[in-house]
Image: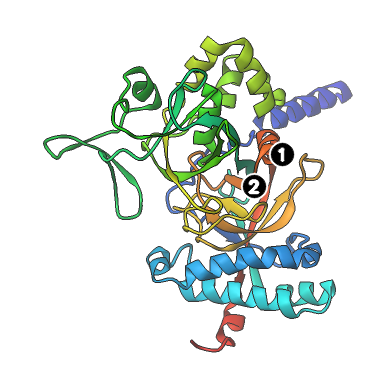
Amino acid sequence: MKLRIVVTALALAFFAAACKTKPDYGRPLPPGAPALIELKPGERRPDFAREFANRDELIPAVERSLAWTRSKHAAQFFPKEGITLERAIASLERFREVLEHAATEQEFRALIDEEFTIYKSAGWDAKGGGVLYTAYCTPILKGSRSQQPGYGHPLYALPPDLVKGKDGEILGRKLADGSLEPYPTREAIEANHVLDGRDLELAWLADPLDAYIAHVNGSAIVELPDGEQIKLGYAGKNGHEYTSLGGELVKGKELKADEVSLQKIREWGKQNPAKLERYMARNASYVFFTPIEGNPRGCLNFEVTPRRSIATDKELFPRAALCFVESKPKQSPAWSAFTLDQDRGGAIRTAGRADIYLGIGPDAEREAGRTRVEGQLYYFFLKPEALARRPQP
């Protein structure tokens, strides 16, 4: 009898382990499910107080979000998840006031705890189960203004036949008769030379993987042979879904899941250039660029701030909102920081994904290429009673 009990216990333990669901961070929310879940009384809260020491670098990012929420353009995107535009603006204003006027870390924590409701992302399981963080940057890539030996991989401007909707969504390619069809995929654009001869080339790069990396990040600085730089920002895309190159290499057993990084992909690509071309073609998404002044801008049309701007699914989350990024313990690189929800990305299409902007240049590129950490994403909004105490505009 004792043996039977032990065997049964082992079987139940095995069954429980087998039934444990592996996080699927690309899983969409069920229809009608909320993207934000309010933290319950007694539920663990993020340890945000240490960010008080970083208030000087945080305030400029808050100001950019405030400038956007105060614009006439912002009203069309609210309410979102029950958050009104009035509450979104007041939350950012009050957070900035607390940053500026709190005398100590303890006072900062007490005021935020007293006045703000904290929500967590519904995450991959629609129950607050967590998010997967990746990162993006603005790479500096070797290139030329014109096609010449050693520079054969173009970055294109937005084609005039690509039609967008009023909110920037891609509607398709406009044909001669005025009808629309889906814009060609990456593979079709490159194999059929769809964009050749249309004077759309903004720069020519030395490496095909560099061009792909520019597409993935949505911005790039092209360094010319004489040292001059061309700054390019995001102009649009072809409307097809993004497919991860690293993920496809793992599926194809070219790389192991625990070794995928941009550096590893570069090393593998140099050894397998023909294979690399085929794997990159699996990503149907294709990005177009525009010359810019200053630093790259996010979907709010304000400059994104390194380590303070994140990209999320804007169909789900309130734009410009105050967030807190937190990685799981022992995850590397570790994250624990206030951020602002100021951008969106081709791979960021669920409540279980978020992208952190890391800045410009090789160091940012290396870190972005290895950032893949699990954690939780929190949103901070004024409590209704705190909102009611605010002066009316």
| Towards the viewer: 236 or 160 | 160
Q: Residue at x 80, y 25 (%)?
A: 10
The residue beneath circle 2 is 359
Specify the quadrant of the image occupied by residue 156.
Answer: top left
SS at circle 2: strand
Q: Would residue 290 be seen by someone viewing this image from the given angle?
A: yes
* Residue 338, above or below 264: below
Furthest-left residue in view?
177
The circle drawn on residue 363 is 1
Answer whether labels 1 and 2 touch (C-beta < 8 Å).
yes
| Residue 116 falls left or right of residue 218 | right
Residue 312, position in %: x, y? 54, 50
Furthest-front residue in view?
226
* Residue 145, above or below 131: above
- Determine crowd level at label 1: few under 14, some 14-19, many 20+ residues with C-alpha closer than 10 A: few
SS at circle 1: helix
Q: Residue at x 46, y 45 (%)?
A: 234
Amino acid tagged 2: Gly
